[in-house]
Amino acid sequence: MKSQSTESFDPEFPIAGEVFLSTEPMTDDEFLQFVRIKNDEIPIENVDFLSDLPA
Amino acid sequence: MERQKFDEVIQVTVLHIAKGLMARHPSMSWRLDWEDKLFQEYEKQRLAIRNKMQLPPDLSEHRIDRHKIASAMALAILNVRPIDPKSDTSAGARLANEFLAITSGGAIVWRFVVEGIKKNRPKDAPKYVSTRFSFPPSSDCPYSTHACKMLHHHPDGGGDLVLANMFFLLEACHLRTVESKHPQIDPTLDEIKQASV
């Protein structure tokens, strides 16, 4: 990496449009509920990509 | 990467982003000796990725592309976990290191995009400098939150090269964002890739 490559780094936070994660306290159970992957979030039955694959 | 250069990079990525996080979560603090540990872990991750690459003979053995730099930094953060959430039990605090990892990687990619444009098309540089790194649009909650959840479930990011490819795709999305914001420019990955690593 060039020595000057970071000298003019944008002083502003370089990530756009993202809202920080919640600051509300969560119990362990609530946190696990928040991060867990729910089966019903992925409608597998509606994904028909296999039919696009060559035989 | 030399330690001095590494310190410069984390000054404008990790430290910069963590400053915003800690302002929002005042009880959080840095873990002891996190900078030394992060440097050691970054070098370990960089070497692991480098050993998986087949590079042309004219490219230095010490060089890896920017998506792999971002991946190595993100994985180092995930393993060292520089931020201690202390008593803060919010989701933001518990996923602080995941957020730091994904956004620090994004910040590194963003910097290289800007450097590539400055070098090859300086007149367009202000458009890239003024457009912050953009994650893809996401329903339900921000993309970065989904990414944090992914890293929570898979703290190795699914593997260093998987994470590097994710940063590649994020860069492609960011470039399309800049292009749509400034339709008169025609960014191409080839020109941007010419940033020095």
Image (spheres, coloured by chain):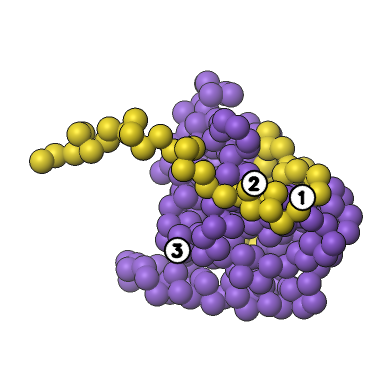
Answer whether labels 1 and 2 touch (C-beta < 8 Å).
yes
Q: Chain of mark 2?
A: A
What is the C-alpha distance between the residues marked 3 and 1? 29 Å
Residue B55 is left or right of residue B76, and the answer is left
Q: Residues within 10 Å of mark 3 (few under 14, many from 20)?
A: few
Q: Residue at x 64, y 46 (%)?
A: A34
- Amino acid, disc 1: Met
Q: Residues within 10 Å of mark 1 (few under 14, many from 20)?
A: some
Q: Secondary structure at mark 3?
A: loop
Q: Quadrant of residue A21?
A: top right
Q: Which mark is residue B159?
A: 3
Q: Which mark is residue B163?
A: none
State whether residue B10 is above or below residue B37: above
Residue found farthest to the front: A29
- Residue B165 visible to an observer of this rendering: yes
Q: Which chain is yellow?
A: A
Q: Secondary structure at mark 2?
A: helix
Q: Quadrant of residue B16?
A: bottom right
- Amino acid, disc 3: Gly
State whether residue B151 is above or below residue B4: above
Q: Which mark is residue A26?
A: 1
**Of tags 3 and 2, which is closer to the observer?**
2
Q: Residue at x 80, y 77 (%)?
A: B32
- Residue B155, percent across and down? 55, 63
- Residue B24, percent across and down? 84, 48
Q: Colour of chain B?
A: purple
What is the C-alpha distance between the residues marked 3 and 2? 24 Å
- Residue A10, percent across and down? 73, 45
Q: Identify the residue under disc 2.
A: A34
Q: Secondary structure at mark 1?
A: loop
Q: Quadrant of residue B79?
A: bottom right
Q: Nearer the viewer, residue B119 or B101?
A: B101
